[in-house]
Amino acid sequence: MGLAYQKDKYKNMATVLLAKRYRVFETFHQRAALVYPLYMDAKIIGRSKTSYIGELTLSEVDTGNVALVVTMKIVCIDEVTKRSKSLPEDMFKEITVPFFSNLGKVFSPVFPKNEASNSFVSSVEVQPSDTDVLNHTAQSAYVKFALNGIAKAAREGVLSGIKDDVCFYRSHTEATIHMGESFVGDVLAVKVWENQEIPLQIHCSIQKNGNRIH
């Protein structure tokens, strides 16, 4: 979802996936398989002057039950100034979506948690396969880095709520927020810690040169 291939029409304009939230329903955990027929419904559910919110829903073909919902907040960036830019007036002319001044109505904010002093730290080097069409590290790659970091922390026994391989624990919500960029060859620090009150709630910070980027 983006405007990477419309630069001739929208000069110096690029779109950046600012935040993403996955909601995984129990039906997905119960029935997910290599052959799992799903319907996909993609739509725009909100927008402001410089950003819009897309929603992707996967539902079971046979039951109609919702298996997975992905909500994405995408911001328009001026490639020259690197600042947010107003969306083209004609971009949504075919889409009848209410104009939301407060995007929190459809995408609640993702607030980065303060890093714990006893965070488990591992590292990863960004590979070519981790990048998107703009040669930036993709959101999906950051999720992979975080999950691998959590798996390593669990294997070392530093997570009180996870005593086995993380694949045996059912995830229900996952949220990410983009705070900086990385590229092929960058070595990133992946820091993992758990919520002391809710041990199964795991937080992750990904840093580049000491600065948090995800």
Image (cartoon, helix red, strand yellow):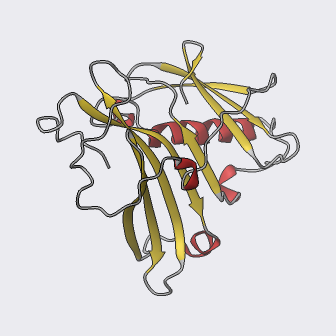
Q: How far across and how far down the image is residue 41, in percent?
A: 38, 69
Q: How far across and how far down the image is residue 47, in percent?
A: 41, 50
Farthest residue toward the bottom? 62
Q: How far across and how far down the image is residue 60, in percent?
A: 47, 79
Left or right of 118 on screen, residue 134: left
Farthest residue toward the right? 197
Left or right of 148 on screen, residue 156: right
Farthest residue toward the left? 8
Residue at image position (35%, 21%) is 82
Above or below, 79 relative to 39: above
Q: Tell which of 68 and 84 is nearer to you.
A: 84
Q: In the picture, residue 155 is in which quadrant?
A: top right
Residue at image position (81%, 35%) is 158
Q: Quadrant of the C terminus?
A: top right
Q: In the picture, residue 37 is in which quadrant?
A: bottom left
Residue at image position (43%, 27%) is 126
Q: How far across and how far down the image is residue 142, in percent?
A: 51, 36
Residue at image position (59%, 60%) is 23
Farthest residue toward the top? 209
Q: Tell which of 173 and 121 is nearer to you.
A: 173
Above or below, 119 relative to 55: above
Report how many numbered discs are placed on residues in the image: 0
